Amino acid sequence: PKRCGHMAGKTVIPAAEMVGKIRAALDARLDDSTLLIARTDALGVNGFEDALERAERYLEAGADALFIEAPQSVAQMQQIGRQFGGRTPLVHNLVEGGNSPVTGSAGLQQLGYRLALYPAALLHQFVPAAQALLQVIANTGSTASLRSQLYELGDMNRVLGAEQLLAAAGQYAGDD
């Protein structure tokens, strides 16, 4: 299975195979509004130079944007920005506790990046909150002591768009 780019034990496919996948995706693209982002995890597997070489090949193959996963330093991020930032949008993963420096979106913009991903930020916030809630339930058998901190059901449904989801589902309901 695919591993997070900030985890050990990754593998990468040959660059030529990825170039073929990019070309196939471009041929299958129905319109230009679909953005093709070419990602490489090669930095953590084969090193920085290989990641740069792959990114160059992916850009030449027609990728619309580049995502060189898990740069190890601001210096590497600067080099990526210098080499590619003027030619194509660059994507960066802001993984709290990951291998890359967390510079924030303003810092990334200064380095030449145009898209910032926060793939785990919500989980980093949710997990401790969920653990605390579950501990209260385990200790007291109830959420009564937390009710003032919990969303009311109606508020939750509004945030989730439940009414719109139910209306959309109704369009496809059977006549039985």
Image (spheres, rainbow, N blue to C red):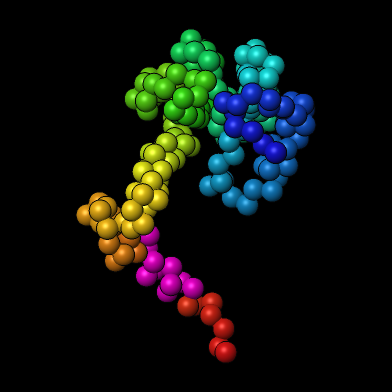
Residue farthest to the bottom?
Answer: 176
> In the picture, residue 131 is in which quadrant?
top left
Closer to the camera, 20 or 144?
144
In the displayed structure, 100 sits above or below 158; it is: above
* Residue 50, horizontal then vertical, whole percent: 68, 16
Answer yes or no: is residue 60 visible: no
Q: How many marks?
A: 0
Image point 59% across, 50% down: which residue? Answer: 31
Image point 42% across, 36% down: which residue? Answer: 124
In the displayed structure, 33 sits above or below 49; it is: below
Indicate yes or no whether the magenta region holds residue 51. no
Q: Is residue 57 left or right of residue 114?
A: right
> In the picture, residue 163 is in which quadrant?
bottom left
Residue farthest to the left?
Answer: 148
Answer yes or no: is residue 10 visible: yes
Closer to the camera, 9 or 15?
9
* Residue 166, horizontal then vertical, whole percent: 43, 72
* Residue 88, horizontal then vertical, whole percent: 52, 27
Image point 47% across, 29% down: which residue? Answer: 95
Quarter placement of the N terminus: top right
Q: Which residues are magenta?
A: 160-169
Indicate yes or no whether the magenta region holds residue 167. yes
* Residue 66, horizontal then vertical, whole percent: 57, 29
Q: Is residue 174 left or right of residue 1?
A: left
Image point 57% across, 89% down: which residue? Answer: 176
Magenta span dominant secondary structure: helix
